[in-house]
Amino acid sequence: MSPPVFRFAPSPNGYLHLGHAYSALLNFDLARRAGGSFLLRVEDIDVTRCRPEFEAAIYEDLAWLGISWETPVRRQSEHLARYREAVEGLSAQGLIYPSFESRSEIARLVAQREAAGPWPRDPDGAPLYPGAAKSLSPGQRQRLMAQSVPYALRLDMEAALASMNELAWQEHGAGPAGEHGLVNASPQAWGDVVLARKETPTSYHLSVVIDDALQGVTDVVRGRDLFWSTSVHRLLQRLLGIPQPAYRHHRLIEDASGHKLSKSTQATALRELRRQGVTPADIRRLAGLPDDARTTTGGC
Ligand code: GLU
């Protein structure tokens, strides 16, 4: 069996905090312990929020923590053509349709639906797509596109699931309710997810599965907040005919009031902690990781 491949895949839309340090160190320790490799991937598809100074800070903070990674680093913004190709493939299978509502129109449609009773929400709490764009005719779609109306390319979940039998993944960590072992995927809980937009030819879900496959990632170790996204990832892997890695969703590091750490809170940013004299060994302790990678059992 070839050695395992782990990865840490931050988005450069803010400074890394203690939660990122935990995730990166956990991946790095697991890779070292298994004699595998550790990759760093920069998930920078959102040009409105990603900034070069945040990317530079990622390299600096990880190196300070004592982490090293293979080069070259894959930067998603450099591979948009690859993602576009995958969208075209799904589209050729009749699994994609464009929707043209703005965010505020969608909010209005949801409010309308909710007047008649609860409207379903995805595992992140966002309302499912309430629109009727799926039933637009090819002519109507062409007309709207010709008028340069912004659009989102959505996965037709019903069509995608039509020929799908059991979908599951191997979970080595735990989900929000302690799910472990073979977990059944339920992509329908996400509705017709957006896979690309007019201005961005991909999405988190699409590029993450393509990159994990292209980079030969065998073990995805990431925060529990992404646990249910794995349902969509498993579906996309099946539709695109790409292999599935094993998953290990780890605990999230919380602040003193029990909230998930956020990139917008400067207090736990690694560079701020460093400025205050906190050492990399302190960070390991604060994150609940053992000092020495050789003795770690993972800390999930
Ligand atoms: N880029 C994602 C984030 O920063 C992580 C993606 C993943 O690990 O699957 O939250």
Image: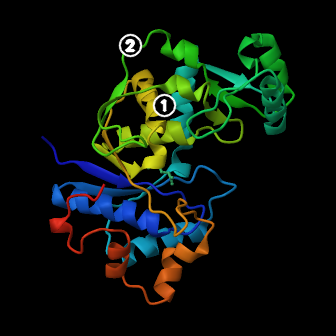
The kind of residue tagged 2 is Asn
Residue at image point 33% right, 65% down: 25
64 vs 165, nearest the viewer:
165
The residue that mark 2 highlights is 165
The reply to whether residue 285 is visible in this rendering is yes
From what the image shows, is residue 235 above or below residue 66?
Answer: above
Mark 1 to mark 2: distance in Å?
Answer: 14 Å
Q: Quadrant of residue 164?
A: top left
Residue 99 x/y as whole percent: 74, 25
Residue at image point 48% right, 63% down: 254
The kind of residue tagged 1 is Val
From what the image shows, is residue 181 above or below residue 52?
Answer: above
Residue at image point 39% right, 42% down: 175
Looking at the rendered image, the quarter that the N terminus falls into is top left
In this rendering, the count of numbered labels is: 2
Q: Secondary structure at mark 2?
A: loop
From what the image shows, is residue 29 above or below residue 285?
Answer: above
Farthest-out residue, right:
147
Residue 139 x/y as whole percent: 80, 12
Dot 1 alpha-carbon crowd within 10 angstroms: few under 14, some 14 to 19, many 20 or more: many
Q: How is the image coloured?
A: rainbow
> In the shown orientation, is residue 112 left or right of residue 217?
right
From what the image shows, is residue 111 above or below residue 66?
Answer: above
The residue that mark 1 highlights is 232
> In the shown orientation, is residue 39 left or right of residue 15?
left
